[in-house]
């Protein structure tokens, strides 16, 4: 008999520890014991779907899956993808009022290139909010070579991001003018980003724990509400890699609950959650 309800599956401390060790090694996400319920609920669905009898069988399944496919599904299930358009608006205001102005003046006639990275972009709202900010406040952005990379570990989230299609409920926090200017209706209750916004953004699967296979340098990196899930050691490594891939004078912008205060780092603090690579 296969258990047909997720609740019927038992998850022992020992198996939970093995799963959390695997998750931490694969993607850096730290799962303390308090997350046992979350793991049980999210991975229990995979166990049932694969008609396995227990979490131990699931562990064996994933360990012997040489294709790596189940690992991708597991990480999709474990990652928390909560996001929204213009989350923490002060960061976008900082771009339009400070960073973009500086770029337009400082680099005028020098380099007309701007590279922005939404690192851990989830379903794309952050990357598209960056693109909308460019379109609304970067004068003559069409004459510039501007590209925004949105990356995430979750293929599930990235597929939604690439589609650029959102339910009207996700647009509730936007003012009507932004919706009118940058989205078009596409089916019942659905809205699609307009082509000029979509063209500024491209998406790629990047696991922070692996080699990134991107060249850089980036002028601005948004990595918000991602490091909060990592151990201090992994945060430190990540911050060092962000430093290396940022252009001189580039900005690193973290989530409101994140700071570099407890992490040894060479960045200059600018204002809440905003740091700069000053040399
Ligand atoms: C809570 S969302 C944050 C989304 C967006 N940055 C924001 O602030 O609204 C965290 C994202 O980090 C991604 N993530 C977690 N571990 C990762 C890793 N090792 N490599 C790349 N992305 C990762 C998750 O898949 C998830 O989509």
Image: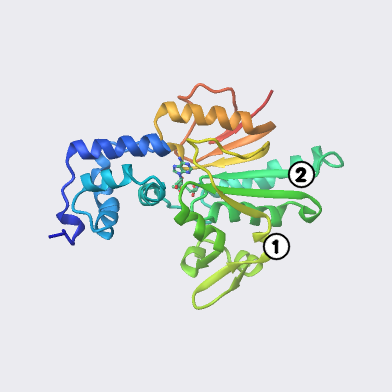
Which secondary structure lies at badge 2?
Answer: strand
| In the image, residue 42 above or below residue 28 | below
| In the image, residue 22 above or below residue 145 | above
In this rendering, would 253 be left or right of 103? left
Quadrant the C terminus occupies:
top right
| Mark 2 nearby-residue class (10 Å; few <14, some 14–19, many ≥20) | some
The answer to the question of whether label 2 and label 1 lie on touching residues, with beta carbons closer than 8 A, is no
In space, the residues marked 2 and 1 are separated at their CA atoms by 17 Å
In this rendering, would 207 be left or right of 180? left
Q: Residue furthest right?
A: 109
> In the rendered image, which residue does mark 1 sit on?
196
Which secondary structure lies at badge 1?
Answer: helix
Q: Residue furthest left?
A: 1
Residue 110 picture quarter: top right
Of residues 245 and 271, the one drawn nearer to the viewer in this rendering: 245
Q: How many marks?
A: 2
Residue 197 picture quarter: bottom right
Residue 217 picture quarter: top right
Of residues 235 and 14, the one drawn nearer to the viewer in this rendering: 14
* Rendered residue at 53%/43% (across/down): 206
In this rendering, would 139 be left or right of 75? right
Quadrant the N terminus occupies:
bottom left
| Residue 249 place in picture, x, y as percent | 69, 31
* Rendered residue at 80%/54% (across/down): 140
Visible residue check, residue 260: no
| Residue 151 place in picture, x, y as percent | 55, 47
| Residue 168 place in picture, x, y as percent | 49, 69
- Looking at the image, is mark 2 or mark 1 earlier in the sequence? 2
> In the rendered image, which residue does mark 2 sit on?
113
- Which color scheme is applied? rainbow
* Rendered residue at 55%/63% (across/down): 163
């Amino acid at each position: 008999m296969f258990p047909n309800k997720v609740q019927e599956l038992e998850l022992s401390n020992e198996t939970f520890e093995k799963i959390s060790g695997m998750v931490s090694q694969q993607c850096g996400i730290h799962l303390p014991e308090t997350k046992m319920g979350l793991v049980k609920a999210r991975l229990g669905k995979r166990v049932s779907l694969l008609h396995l009898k227990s979490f131990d069988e699931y562990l064996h399944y994933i360990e012997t899956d040489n294709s790596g496919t189940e690992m991708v599904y597991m990480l999709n299930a474990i990652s928390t993808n909560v996001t929204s358009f213009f989350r923490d608006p002060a960061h976008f205001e900082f771009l339009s009022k400070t960073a973009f102005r500086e770029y337009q003046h400082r680099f005028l006639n020098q380099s007309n290139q701007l590279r922005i990275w939404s690192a851990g972009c989830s379903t794309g709202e952050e990357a598209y909010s960056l693109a909308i900010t460019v379109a609304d406040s970067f004068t003559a952005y069409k004459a510039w070579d501007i590209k925004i990379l949105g990356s995430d570990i979750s293929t599930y989230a990235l597929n939604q991001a690439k589609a650029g299609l959102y339910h009207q409920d996700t647009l509730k926090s936007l003012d009507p003018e932004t919706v009118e200017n940058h989205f078009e209706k596409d089916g019942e209750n659905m809205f699609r980003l307009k082509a000029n916004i979509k063209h500024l953004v491209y998406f790629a699967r990047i696991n922070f724990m692996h080699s990134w296979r991107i060249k850089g340098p980036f002028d601005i990196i948004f990595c918000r509400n991602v490091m909060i899930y990592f151990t201090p050691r992994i945060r430190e490594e990540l911050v060092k890699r962000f430093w290396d891939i940022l252009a001189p004078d580039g900005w690193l912008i973290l989530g409101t609950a994140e700071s570099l205060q407890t992490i040894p780092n060479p960045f200059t603090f600018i204002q809440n959650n905003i740091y700069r690579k000053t040399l």
